[in-house]
Amino acid sequence: MWLLIKLLLCVFFTVSTNDAQTSDVSFKNVTIQWKADGHDLRKFVVAFSNSLKEQIPDVVDDSVTITISGAIPTLHENSISDLNKLSSISLTNVGLQEIKAAAFRNLELKVLTLSSNKLEEIRGGTFENVSLTNLQLFNNQLKKIEPGVLTILCGLTSVGLSNNQLEEIDPEAFSNPGIEYLDLQFNSITTLRPGDFKNLPNLRNLELTANKLGEIREGIFNNLKISHLKLNYNAISKIDTKAFDDMPELSVLHIDNNTLTHWDNNWLHNTPKLAYVVAANNLIENIPEEAFKNYPRVYSISLQNNRIKIVSPNALKTSKSIVNLDLRDNLIDYWDEKVLGNVSISTVFLDNNKLKCIDGDLKTVFKNVYSAVHLSGNPWDPDCPFLSLSNNRLQEIRAGVFENVSVERLFLHDNFVHRVEAGAFVDLLGLAAVELSNNKLEEIDPEGFDIPRLRNLVLKFNTISTLRPGDLKNLPQLRSLDLLKNKLKEITEGVFNGTRITHLKLSYNEISKIASKAFDDMTELVVIHIDHNKLTQWDNNWLRNTPKLRHVVAEYNYIKEIPQEAFKNYPRIHSIDLQGNKIKKISTNALVTSELISIFDLRDNLIDYWDKQFLANVTFSSVLLNNNRLKCIDGDLKTIFKRVNFAVHFWGNPWDPACPVKTDYFENKRRN
């Protein structure tokens, strides 16, 4: 009997011990995809293991990326440890619920992704002797991050925590001097307290979109280095007057899609780098005097879709320059001729308000608007010097239909117009603007468009396939021409030469060829858009004798190379945008004739080499090199980019870990 009892006890303890050992194993029947530089992708199944190190082949001088799939409810101690060549690891959607202490140990990672799992907390001790650049924890169920968890992660610059259940910012948990980017979108944060970000001294980009914030108090953001702040899609009804004061690096502020009813003209004191203020989709009812006095020069202010009825005549009294002022979809029923004062504005959007008329001479009212004023969708009074026949079924504009009519602006958009008869507009002696977008026009007939005083012609979203020399000969005062989204394939010489056009939009066509002299002698040209076409070549002879040129937009074409003396005909310019092309090669002498380019945008190209002499003699404000193929840049970055006064953007390049240059010095930062 005693022997039988001993035997049963032995069996019981053996089974219990085996069950315990099995339950402590992290990897059971999981698939590992393993990729090292210079090696093909490998894929294999791990049947039973508690150590990833046992499964990864020995690799010398390579950077390893690992993706694990399968069911991993728990990561136990030392599960992922002592992998000195591991660069990136992803455990996405593996059902991870718990991470034991020291599960990650002795690692030098660039990216760790634990997203789309079931984690509810990150405990202290999870990481032991781990350096990490980018930590992604989005789409979990996180309610708590224990103090110190992020603090000990050396090299950490980016943390993604969107789509979790966090209710507050614990400054002891969010503590790491290296963090520059923090994504907290789609959580349940209800309150921000002064000091919540005190332990993130180098935070540049903070995203708090779609939380449950109701108020922004003073003391939360003041004196932080944040450049991009997103507070949109919350329930914010109150922002303290000094809430955004003394944010010296702030460039972009999103407070849109909240419940604000009041615009405080004292907001944003001492924010010298502010460029974008987005406050659309709130409940703001009026724009007060000196509304934007603390940021007199700004790129864009968006107040679309509020409940604005009153715009103070002195609202822009202290403003000097606003590129885009967006007041669409409000309740504005009166526009004082003094509103724009002396401010220089590129575009004003007043579509879909309650305007019935605008008193005064439009040339005077909008004299400082150098690109366009958008007024469609307003209920114009028939006796007003505007006439709107938009959103009808008109098929042609015949001669004589405007006899005894006097208007300055004529809206004919969203019809079916395919023909403008010769002399159609001859009776409209004071006509300054015609809006014919969203029609069926296939050509510009110079006899139909015989309008001597016309300054603004909008022909976007038609089917115009060809522009012929002489098409614009009867439009001697034309300043702005919008041909966006037509079917143009080629721009020949003789169409635009000698015209007084200041703003020319040829975007979203099918243009694959532009003659070398197509834009010569456009002495008033300020802005040209040739973006979203099919250009494969940059011609360094374009745009001769265009002394007022400020902006060249050529993004999203198929340009492969920037040639020698690429911009020789406009040595001093505000912006050149070549984003989203196929540029791989930049001639060493590409900028040898350039003197000043404020914004040089080369994002999203294929550039894999950057010569240290490219920028030698040119002064820049910003250079954008995000999302190219750069692995390293030879030389000292401070010397190479010494003439860049504001910012150099590098993020999104596949940097070689062995590169001696510390690229993160410039990454997502503003230079003083």
Image (cartoon, grey):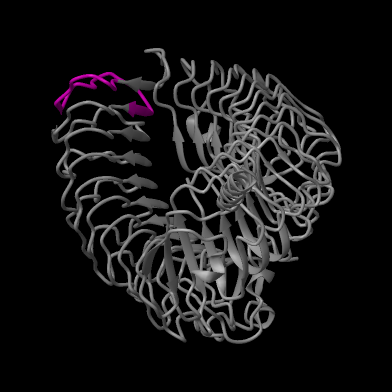
Task: Give the residue displayed 58% in from the left and 27% down from the top.
Answer: 257
Q: What percent of the width, then of the height, locates residue 550?
A: 50, 60
Q: Quadrant of residue 106?
A: bottom right
Judge whether residue 299 can be spotted in this image. Answer: no
Q: Quadrant of residue 402?
A: top left
Q: Is residue 352 left or right of residue 139?
A: left
Q: Nearer the viewer, residue 669 or 468?
A: 669
Q: Nearer the viewer, residue 644 or 92?
A: 92
Height in image: 220 above or below 385?
below
Q: Quadrant of residue 514?
A: bottom left
Q: Nearer the viewer, residue 212 or 283?
A: 212
Q: Is residue 399 magenta?
A: yes
Q: What percent of the width, then of the height, locates residue 574?
A: 54, 62
Q: What percent of the width, then of the height, locates residue 123?
A: 73, 47
> Image quadrant for the C terminus?
bottom right
The number of discs equals: 0
Q: Is residue 439 magenta?
A: no
Height in image: 496 above or below 119?
below
Q: Is residue 656 left or right of residue 376?
A: right
Q: Which residues are magenta?
A: 389-410
Q: What percent of the width, then of the height, locates residue 172?
A: 83, 46
Task: Give the residue displayed 32% in from the left and 55% down from the top.
Answer: 532
> Image quadrant for the N terminus?
top right
Task: Give the residue displayed 51% in from the left and 48% down from the top.
Answer: 72
Q: Is residue 464 left or right of residue 330?
A: left
